[in-house]
Image (spheres, rainbow, N blue to C red):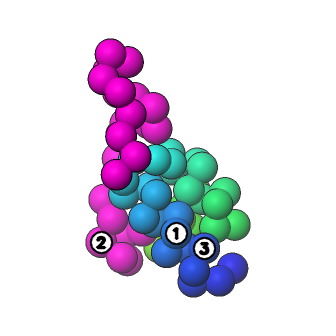
Amino acid sequence: MSSHSLTSALTLYRSGTLTLTQAAAHCGRSETEFQLAAAGHGAERRESVAGDRDPATPARAD
């Protein structure tokens, strides 16, 4: 897979927009492969999932 899709997946994963599973699928890698790539780029594994926020707080687009 291209490095652009990995970069995009890492960015979205770090921001909390994508879960680990979603980010791995986004760049065409298994979850294990994505975790290794993310660790190599300094992204720590998150335990929270996308959308795991207070529903009373509006989503921000910035």
Magenta stretch: dominant secondary structure: loop
Q: Nearer the viewer, residue 19 or 12?
A: 12
Q: CA distance from mark 1 to mark 2?
A: 14 Å
| Residue 60 coordinates in the image, percent (x, y) | 36, 40
Quarter occupied by residue 57? top left
| Residue 41 coordinates in the image, percent (x, y) | 36, 76
> Type of residue at label 3?
Ser
The quadrant of the image that shows the N terminus is bottom right
Q: Which residue is mark 2?
A: 42
Q: Vertical placement of 42 versus 31: above or below?
A: below
Direction from residue 47 to residue 23 in the image, left or right: right
Q: Residues within 10 Å of mark 3 (few under 14, many from 20)?
A: some
What residue lies at 46% left-to-right and 47% top-to-bottom?
A: 17
Q: Which residues are magenta?
A: 38-62
Instruction: List the single residue furthest toward the bottom.
Output: 3
Q: Residues within 10 Å of mark 2 (few under 14, many from 20)?
A: few
Q: Nearer the viewer, residue 7 or 57?
A: 57
What residue lies at 34% left-to-right and 51% top-to-bottom?
A: 62
Label 2's element? loop
Q: CA distance from mark 2 to mark 3?
A: 17 Å
Please name which of the two marks, 2 or 3, marks the residue nearer to the observer. 3
| Residue 29 coordinates in the image, percent (x, y) | 65, 66
Q: Which residue is mark 3?
A: 5
Residue 42 lies within the magenta run: yes
Indicate which disc, 1 or 2, sits on the residue closer to the N terminus: 1
Q: CA distance from mark 3 to mark 1?
A: 5 Å
Residue 41 lies within the magenta run: yes
Label ID, residue 8: 1
> Type of residue at label 2?
Gly
Q: Tell me whether the residue at label 3 lies in contact with that at label 1, contact meaning CB atoms closer than 8 angstroms.
A: yes
